[in-house]
């Protein structure tokens, strides 16, 4: 009787939205990035053909849903997943460091889509058996998938950064709005700092305009660190920073996992009272978005550890001690 020896194989691929991050992940894992041979037809349609056999392999497809062509990034990942499924991959994991359309996770008004659910459905139908992401805008997005979701967080990386930056005795962690209070409270507890939050008002009918109303908590003569999951147009963060300064804060920093930085975010941050902006590299930062006060921390190690755990069929939450997974 012939004895079959099955050897597990991990294959890592990426689209073109953030190849630098994918290469960092590959380096951390000690593997080579595979070649998906992506190309565009003359009419703009996408094509993918893997450069090696992936039959029976554990395939991880890294693609952050980055703008300005976020729809192209998502479609590219879907096509790569479909190609892997049709090439008989054993398991396909969609690695989405930044998950697109995450803020459209509910119907705020009538006749609106729930696009975060639509993206989840598309990834699943394409053939993804699992999804890995970092700091989803809301935890409920995990429920949009009928497949396993590994929801990682950058909080330990940001906490380590603050601890290494000096004394935290005069530091206050500030949530820029009520929705960020829970995460800010957990973050403040790990740092060992006080907590405050900014009450904001978003005028009806305006998606990108906010008004910071008042601060709840003591920030006078304190170093304030504004914490959010993302910075998009920077309207919320800058308005909150102005209010904190008016309330007597000695210094204001801004920290977030995702630096979307849609226009006019870069100019707003550059000209704001914020002295330091700390982000992770879940999204790329082209030269025009790089300003002197910006510091970028790498999330590659966190994602690489999660990929390794998935590949080895280990518990992701256990290898992180319950800290890096939500």
Image (tube, rainbow, N blue to C red):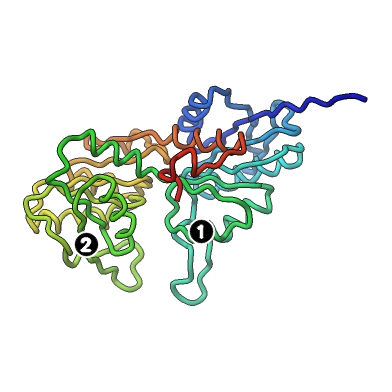
Residue underneath mark 1: 141
Q: Is residue 79 above or below residue 246?
A: above
Extreme residue toward the right, this view: 1
Does 251 sit left or right of 30 as displayed?
left
Q: Is residue 212 above or below residue 17?
A: below
Does 186 sit left or right of 15 as displayed?
left
Residue 214 appears at what percent x and percent y?
16, 66
Residue 69 appears at what percent x and percent y?
49, 46
Q: Is residue 68 visible?
A: no
Crowd around label 1: few <14 · some 14–19 · many ≥20 (10 Å): many
Residue 233 appears at what percent x and percent y?
32, 53
Mark 1: secondary structure: helix
Does 258 sit left or right of 119 as displayed?
left
Distance, label 1 to label 2, CA atoms, is 25 Å
Residue underneath mark 2: 198
Q: Residue at x 32, y 59 (%)?
A: 180
Q: Residue at x 49, y 52 (%)?
A: 100
Q: Residue at x 57, y 55 (%)?
A: 119
Give 171 or 244, whichever is nearer the viewer.
Answer: 171
Give 228 or 112, whichever is nearer the viewer.
Answer: 228
Crowd around label 2: few <14 · some 14–19 · many ≥20 (10 Å): many
Residue 255 appears at what percent x and percent y?
28, 45
Res 163 quadrant in image: top left
């Amino acid at each position: 009787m012939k004895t079959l020896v099955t050897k597990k194989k991990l294959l890592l691929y990426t689209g073109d939205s953030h190849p630098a991050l994918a290469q960092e992940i590959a380096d951390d894992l000690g593997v080579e990035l595979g070649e998906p041979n992506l190309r565009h037809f003359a009419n703009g349609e996408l094509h993918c053909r893997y450069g090696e056999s992936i039959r029976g392999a554990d395939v991880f497809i890294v693609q952050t849903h980055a703008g300005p062509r976020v729809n192209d990034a998502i479609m590219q990942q879907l096509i790569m997943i479909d190609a892997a499924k049709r090439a008989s991959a054993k398991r396909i994991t969609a690695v989405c460091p930044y998950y697109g359309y995450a803020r459209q996770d509910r119907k705020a008004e009538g006749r609106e889509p729930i696009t975060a659910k639509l993206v989840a459905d598309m990834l699943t139908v394409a053939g993804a058996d699992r999804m890995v992401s970092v700091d989803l805008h809301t935890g409920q997005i995990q429920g949009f998938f009928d497949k396993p979701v590994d929801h990682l967080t950058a909080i330990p990386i940001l906490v380590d950064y603050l601890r290494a930056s000096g004394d935290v005795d005069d530091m206050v962690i500030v949530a820029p709005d009520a929705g960020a209070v829970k995460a800010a409270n957990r973050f403040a507890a790990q740092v060992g700092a006080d907590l405050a939050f900014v009450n904001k008002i978003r005028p009806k009918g305006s998606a990108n305009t906010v008004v910071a109303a008042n601060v709840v908590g003591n920030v006078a003569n304190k170093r304030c660190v504004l914490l959010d999951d993302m910075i998009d147009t920077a309207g919320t963060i800058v308005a909150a920073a102005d209010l904190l300064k008016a309330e007597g804060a000695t210094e204001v920093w801004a920290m977030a996992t995702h630096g979307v930085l849609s226009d006019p975010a870069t100019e707003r941050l550059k000209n704001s009272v914020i002295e330091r902006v700390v982000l992770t590299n879940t999204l790329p930062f082209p030269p025009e978005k790089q300003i002197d006060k910006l510091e970028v921390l790498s999330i590659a190690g966190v994602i690489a550890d999660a990929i390794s755990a998935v590949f080895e069929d280990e518990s992701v939450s256990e290898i992180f001690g319950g800290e890096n997974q939500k």
